[in-house]
Amino acid sequence: MNVYLNSIDGIADAITTMFFSKRTWTRELEEEIRAVCFRVNNRNGKFIGSSLEEDNIKYSKWLEQLTRWGWRHTTMLRFVDFSITVEGLHRGGQDDWDSHAKRFENRIIRSSTRLANFGNEMSEWYKGKIITTDTALAILGINAPNEIEVDGLIYVKAINGYIQKGMEDNPDVKRGLYMLSIPSNFIFKINLTETGHVYKERNKFGTANPEVKIMCEECVDQIEDFQKQFNRDLLLKIKN
């Protein structure tokens, strides 16, 4: 399984939100915030530092203020978005992650078991822990028949079982034999406030599936690597 943090967006927007409530916002200040963020972060939103130390000091102060206030005033942190791609999480775990689709504002697209074909494959986490029937028979040197007859109907061999003849290419029928251990790829977006909720539910100290917990922690590792202020302490504090 691989996790890729593609980008962090909206940091300048989030910082700007701090200056509206007490009417300290000016267009000049907002333009300065955006210019500083442009200089200290790369195109993907990762902090790389500016050659101007004044920029780094300002940016650090703004983010300290944003995270100090934002964990309670959670709308501020909703302006920050994470784009993340996951490769190879097992389908059962991806279904668990999918249960947070509302938190992603439904911004999640995954490999379809209807539109894509899966073979006798599984995510890395399951390898060595389980053996499919097809693999076990091959190991034992047992050749399963290509066709069998049940109640007068002919079934042809497919991945993980048999399918009624004539339906072997029907995607809705084929996926009935797919196991939850098959690897799934997906991309999702989530804002910083909602990340706090998902992290509380799926982190390594919870009761989630082990591979889901590994994925969750890897997401946060990479977020912290991009922006150190967006760390686990903040995620656990966010009121959401």
Image: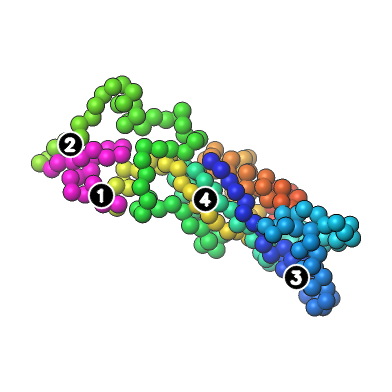
Q: How many C-alpha atoms fall within 10 Å of the one at disc 2: few (<14), some, or many (≥20)?
A: some
Going by the numbered disc 1, the residue's amino acid type is Asp
In which quadrant will I find the C terminus?
bottom right
Task: Say which of 121 and 25 sits in front.
Answer: 121
CA distance for labels 1 and 2: 15 Å
Q: Quadrant of residue 159?
A: top left
Q: How many C-alpha atoms fall within 10 Å of the one at disc 3: few (<14), some, or many (≥20)?
A: some
CA distance for labels 3 and 4: 30 Å
Which marked residue is nearer to the observer: mark 3 or mark 1? 1
| Residue underneath mark 4 | 97
Mark closer to the chain start, 1 or 4: 4
- 57 left or right of 170? right
CB under 8 Å between discs 3 and 4: no
Answer whether residue 219 is magenta in the image: no
Colour pattern of the rendering = rainbow
Answer whether residue 163 is magenta in the image: yes
Q: Can you name the residue that lies furthest to the left here?
A: 152
Which marked residue is nearer to the observer: mark 1 or mark 4? 1
Identify the disc placed on residue 169. 1
Residue drawn at x 75%, y 70% is 17
Q: How many C-alpha atoms fall within 10 Å of the one at disc 1: few (<14), some, or many (≥20)?
A: few
Return the x and y of residue 141 as percentages of the image width and height. Answer: 28, 22
Mark closer to the chain start, 2 or 4: 4
| Residue underneath mark 2 | 147
SS at circle 1: loop
Going by the numbered disc 2, the residue's amino acid type is Glu
Which region is colored magenta? 153-171
